[in-house]
Amino acid sequence: MGILENLNIELKNAIKAKDSLKLDSLRAIKSAILLAQTSKNSNGSLSEVDVIKLLHRLVKQRRESAKIYKEQERYDLAEPEELQAEIISSYLPEQLSESEILIIVKETIAETNATGMKDMGKTIGMINKKISGKAEGKLIASLVKKELSK
């Protein structure tokens, strides 16, 4: 069962359970998916990879909002954002640990014969294809940069 099918089932369950926080989170996901499907650049459907990227973006937005609210000492607004980020994260594939990503980074650097920072983009592109949504891009970029600067 794909993410979209699972989402519809969970949405119905949240309505029945009257879980407003989960319902808001699921509606945000569904809204973002529908907007992406109907955008000019879309052919009307999204692949699982596209949905995963979309979910990552939604989680990142929620976490950034929570951070801003905390800086402004608006904890009443930060908490729901963090909880929504957690709910949305549950629909993402299991994330790799930093050590697992580091192994893939080292393997890819060896495969591409990357020698310096000029090869960073090519290396990150190959790693993203291998990992496909199982790690944040920021973490991958920092590990590649660290390895290539040695």
Image (cartoon, rainbow, N blue to C red):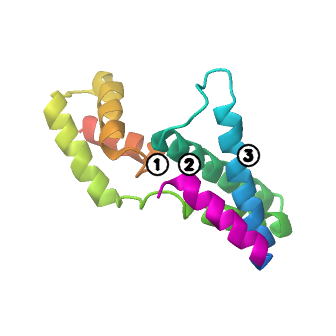
Q: Which residue is mark 3?
A: 31
Q: Is residue 131 above or below residue 97?
A: above
Estimate how packed mark 1 is, as few (under 14), some (14 to 19) or many (20 or more) residues with alpha carbons within 10 Å. Answer: some
User: Is 87 placed left or right of 139 in the picture?
Assistant: right
Q: Report x, y in % for residue 8.
A: 65, 59
Of residues 133 and 76, the one drawn nearer to the viewer in this rendering: 133
Marker disc for residue 51: none
Q: Which residue is mark 1?
A: 136
Q: Is residue 70 magenta?
A: no
Which residue is at 80% across, 70% downward? 20
The earlier-in-sequence mark between 1 and 3 is 3
In space, the residues marked 1 and 2 are separated at their CA atoms by 8 Å
Q: Report x, y in % for residue 2.
A: 49, 54
What stretch of residues is rendered in magenta?
1-16
In space, the residues marked 1 and 3 are separated at their CA atoms by 23 Å
The earlier-in-sequence mark between 1 and 2 is 2
Callout 1, which amino acid?
Glu
